[in-house]
Image (cartoon, rainbow, N blue to C red):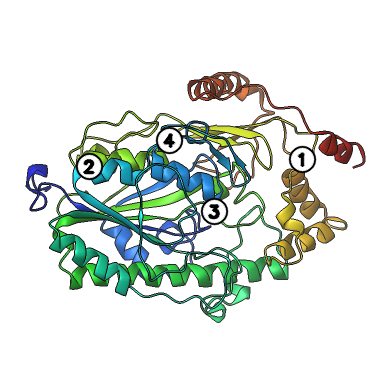
Amino acid sequence: MLISLNLWGNQGKPNFIIVIGDDVGWDAFGCTGMKEARTSAIDQLARESTMMSRFYCSVSQCAPLRAELYTGLLPKNNGVLANAKKEKRFGVKNIADFLIPLGYKVGLSGKKHFGLGTAKIDPIPGFASGANGSNQVHTFDGVEAYISEAKKGGLSFCLIIGATHAHHPWDHGEESNFPVDEIQLRPHYIDTPTARQAVAKHAAEVEVLDQQVGETRELMKKMDLEKDTILIFLSEQGIAMPRGKWSPYEHGSRALCLAHWKGRILPRKTNALAMYCDIVPTLIDFAGGEDPLLDGTSLMGLWTEEKVKDHRKEVLISNVHPFWQKAIVTDTYKLVWTGHPEREHIWGNFNSKGKFFAKPWTEWMERAKSNKSAARKVERVLQPKAFELYDVVSDPYETKDLASKASHKQRIKTLHQQLKALMTECGESTIPPQLSDRNKKKNQTK
């Protein structure tokens, strides 16, 4: 039974600790079905939390995801449309702008990748700020000192730990813990040696992230924070593999969210749809603030009331770079709308010589020359249809496109209308942009 929500914290409001991973989708953990995962701390947290495994980012890239998370606004409204595409917006507030007036110190240790708003998010030493480095180490000393300072000052705190795992270069953790012959490949992958090794390298990084979650909980116990602190774990966007990061597909845009507060937040699994922009309104709600009227809406009811079963009716996925692809996600279906199906949809990073995740793609292209099954999988990456429809409940890796079936014709039409309505509501154009001359020439020479 939940304790009355009027009794939390000495000041009537909880503290917040948010741990966010890097390039880690919903499917990287034991609690979500990855059999070889070594994620004991996250799996334990999941059993004690409201576990949301259908938690989405509007754009599966680092900068727009964090802008959505820290502003409560969708990309078109906060101006961060992609890592490489930004538009100036005025009056955008960040998480600190909202929480400082409510009596909070707001700090971040680790990867920030964000610069909107007026109020300063305090930098906290201890975790690496850049995600591309090897030999990274971390310490919780700065985090502990920051919490102690807040408590001495009689302030609540919101503390974010921005982990850099499992962002490339994928050289942290013990890769040997994940024998490649035991790796469970996703069904849209092609079974090649470096594909297996890529999953092993990524899993080793996720194990490091898991250790950091465990250390966070140990610190909370040490500092007696559990009774008045909400712990939120967010996995971030998916792995940097084809149809993962940079794409609108589930492997890239779907995340895991765990919310824990013993005795206050319900320990349960839910398939309710939610988005990163819902976090800031949720924190404000728990802190006793007024509804900020953002794109996101508070999850407090879902997390604390048995009778609340749902949150969003649909989710908007809104990629503009490297490819214009929009999608709408409902409780069962996803419609993906590709603006220029005539061009090849493979991000240039997958042809990079300096990134390990490019090696599987090279092998896949070579395998496709002589293997029909591999060729079909490569074609599905390179040449998406103008409209693709998936049952993401029974087919979460979107291997069976239902768009050609007559029985779904009306569903596609209805979902397309709903998608355009969502786009219009947040100020997006429903007309795909013209291809640049350079891209037109690329398509003509394929």
Q: Nearer the viewer, residue 331 or 83?
A: 83
For marks 1 and 3, give the CA distance: 21 Å
Tell me the residue at 63%/67% (across/down). 198
Determine whether the residue tagged by mark 4 lies in a helix, strand or loop: loop
For marks 2 and 3, give the CA distance: 34 Å
The answer to whether residue 173 is visible is yes
Q: Nearer the viewer, residue 40 or 421?
A: 421
Q: Nearer the viewer, mark 2 or mark 3?
A: 2
Tell me the residue at 15%/56% (across/down). 228
For marks 2 and 4, give the CA distance: 19 Å
On residue 101, the disc is: 2
On residue 73, the disc is: 4
Query: How dense is the environment of label 2, judged by Cα within 10 Å: few (below 14), some, or many (20 and up)?
Result: few
Dot 1 or dot 3, earlier in sequence = 3
Dot 1 or dot 2, earlier in sequence = 2
Amino acid carrying label 4: it is Leu
Q: Position of residue 422 (x, y in %)?
A: 50, 24
Amino acid carrying label 2: it is Pro
On residue 238, the disc is: 3
Q: Nearer the viewer, mark 4 or mark 1?
A: 4
Q: Give the image quarter of residue 355.
A: bottom right
In the image, residue 29 above or below residue 69:
below
Amino acid carrying label 3: it is Gly
Q: Quadrant of the C terminus?
A: top right
In the image, residue 76 above or below residue 17:
above
Dot 2 or dot 4, earlier in sequence = 4
Determine whether the residue tagged by mark 3 lies in a helix, strand or loop: loop
Q: Position of residue 97 (x, y in %)?
A: 32, 42
